[in-house]
Image: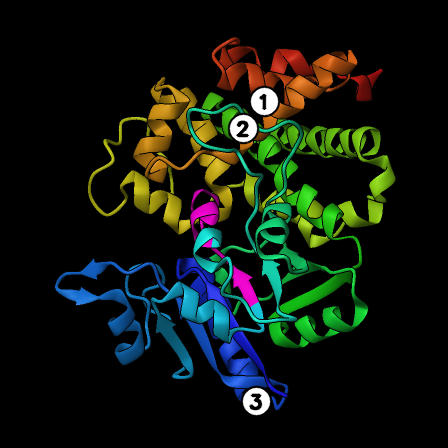
């Protein structure tokens, strides 16, 4: 029986994945020809975004200039979508996931599965402390919907995927039969998929790299060169490996995982500027290169961009989150805070100077100018 595929989220990456899935479904007897995209309805001028997608076959707000296949159909009824879909692909901002899961709960098909493309951890509500430990988003999906959830992560910037520029991603899925099925759904000549059975390892890489990217943003703002930034990225990679081995050794995370697109590849893409966008300390956020557009242009680099903006503007992190992310919490500082708490409890702060420094700077306990000083006596150099 043909599988029904639904993409939950219609931002730039959601639109990219919808295009890929719709094209693959159209040429396959394995998947239903119609691929549905859940759209959080909004007006573009006087037109509904869902109507624009279904008539013009283009997401004019989040992925302008990219034509979507005619079999990619925008819908707005979340419960109806859940009752229809066999494969639910989650591609939306982390802050909206709990609300979306509440809308899907009790409205899913028996035997349905999920795939998460969301990088980050569950941070609770703004007024609440972060849950104990790194609460992964796939755990939230599994507990709410009662279905298995695979993970697709990598060095994937939506504007480049939309242009069909070659890239790769890592699929974490413990069921080899389902993994092969999902690979057939996602893989194209320009979007190549590697499979790892350990879902956790793929997701934790996608979360921890946000800390390193924030530190890379500090480097850019302070005017350090490529040598320094390369050192920060390497030291960050080593701290990720050390942290995962110490706290999640039993989960089977290996160096092989960290060398995948979800690991080293994602760290690199998250830590560098895009080729055509420059941050200006005097920029006031207006016009075509406003703050919001800057983030949208390079979703994968937003931790780097806000790290840079913190130093250049001197504004508090929460204010920048409101200005640049519409209030969405930045993952790098959130995860750095939880990592710092775990390291402090274990008496391991001195072994992770980069992660510790990112937390202290983001929380206002250290001047950004002292960032590199914290790395001069790094354990990797002892």
Residue range in magenta is 88-100
**272 and 297: which is toward the camera:** 297
Q: Is residue 349 left or right of residue 313?
A: right
The residue that label 3 is drawn on is: 27
How many angstroms separate mark 3 from mark 2 (CA)? 42 Å
- The answer to if 90 sits in the magenta stretch is yes
Q: How is the image coloured?
A: rainbow
- The answer to if 350 sits in the magenta stretch is no
Q: Is residue 375 left or right of residue 175?
A: left
Question: In the image, is residue 17 above or below residue 67?
Answer: above
How many angstroms separate mark 2 from mark 1 (CA)? 5 Å
The residue that label 2 is drawn on is: 334
Q: Quadrant of residue 373?
A: top right
* Mark 1 crowdedness (10 Å alpha carbons): few <14, some 14-19, many ≥20: many
Say what secondary structure mark 3 lies in: loop
Instruction: State the residue at coordinates (75%, 46%).
Output: 201
Question: In the image, is residue 290 above or below residue 312?
Answer: below
Say what secondary structure mark 2 lies in: helix
Instruction: State the residue at coordinates (49%, 53%).
Output: 101
**293 and 95: which is toward the camera:** 95
Instruction: State the residue at coordinates (43%, 31%).
Output: 306
* Mark 2 crowdedness (10 Å alpha carbons): few <14, some 14-19, many ≥20: many
**Residue 315 is at least partly visible in this image:** yes
The residue that label 1 is drawn on is: 337
All told, the count of numbered labels is: 3
* Mark 3 crowdedness (10 Å alpha carbons): few <14, some 14-19, many ≥20: few
Residue 171 x, y percent position in the rendering: 70, 60
**4 and 292: which is toward the camera:** 4
Residue 99 x, y percent position in the rendering: 43, 48
Q: Quadrant of the C terminus?
A: top right
How many angstroms separate mark 1 from mark 3 (CA)? 46 Å
């Amino acid at each position: 029986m043909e599988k029904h595929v639904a993409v939950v989220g219609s931002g730039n990456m959601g639109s990219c994945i919808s295009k890929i899935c719709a094209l693959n479904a159209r040429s396959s007897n394995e998947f239903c020809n119609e691929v549905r995209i859940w759209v959080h309805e909004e007006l573009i001028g006087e037109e509904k975004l869902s109507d624009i997608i279904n008539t013009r076959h283009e997401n004019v707000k989040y992925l302008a200039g990219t034509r979507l296949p005619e079999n990619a159909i925008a819908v707005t009824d979340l419960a109806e979508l859940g009752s229809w879909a066999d494969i639910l692909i989650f591609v939306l901002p982390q802050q909206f996931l709990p609300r979306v899961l509440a809308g899907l709960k009790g409205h899913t098909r028996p035997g349905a599965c999920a795939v998460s493309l969301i990088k980050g951890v569950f941070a609770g509500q703004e007024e609440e402390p972060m849950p104990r430990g790194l609460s992964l988003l796939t755990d939230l999906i599994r507990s709410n919907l009662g279905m298995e959830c695979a993970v697709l992560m990598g060095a994937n910037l939506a504007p480049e995927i939309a242009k069909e520029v070659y890239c790769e991603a890592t699929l974490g899925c413990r069921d080899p039969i389902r993994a092969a099925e999902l690979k057939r759904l996602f893989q194209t000549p320009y979007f190549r998929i590697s499979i790892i059975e350990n879902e956790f390892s793929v997701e934790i890489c996608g979360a921890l790299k946000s800390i390193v990217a924030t530190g890379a943003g500090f480097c850019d703002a302070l005017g350090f060169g490529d040598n320094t930034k390369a050192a920060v990225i390497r030291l960050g990679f080593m701290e990720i490996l050390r942290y995962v081995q110490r706290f999640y050794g039993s989960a089977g995370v290996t160096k092989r995982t960290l060398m995948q697109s979800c690991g080293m590849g994602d760290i690199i893409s998250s830590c560098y500027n895009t080729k055509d966008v420059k941050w200006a300390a005097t920029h006031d956020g207006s016009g075509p290169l406003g703050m919001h557009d800057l983030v949208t242009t390079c979703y994968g680099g937003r931790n780097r961009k806000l790290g840079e903006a913190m130093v250049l503007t001197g504004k508090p992190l929460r204010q920048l989150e409101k200005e640049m992310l519409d209030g969405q919490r930045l993952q790098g500082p959130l995860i750095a805070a939880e990592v710092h708490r775990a390291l402090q409890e274990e008496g391991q702060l001195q072994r992770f100077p980069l992660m510790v420094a990112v937390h202290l700077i983001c929380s206002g306990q250290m001047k950004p100018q002292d960032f590199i000083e914290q790395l001069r006596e790094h354990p990797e150099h002892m």
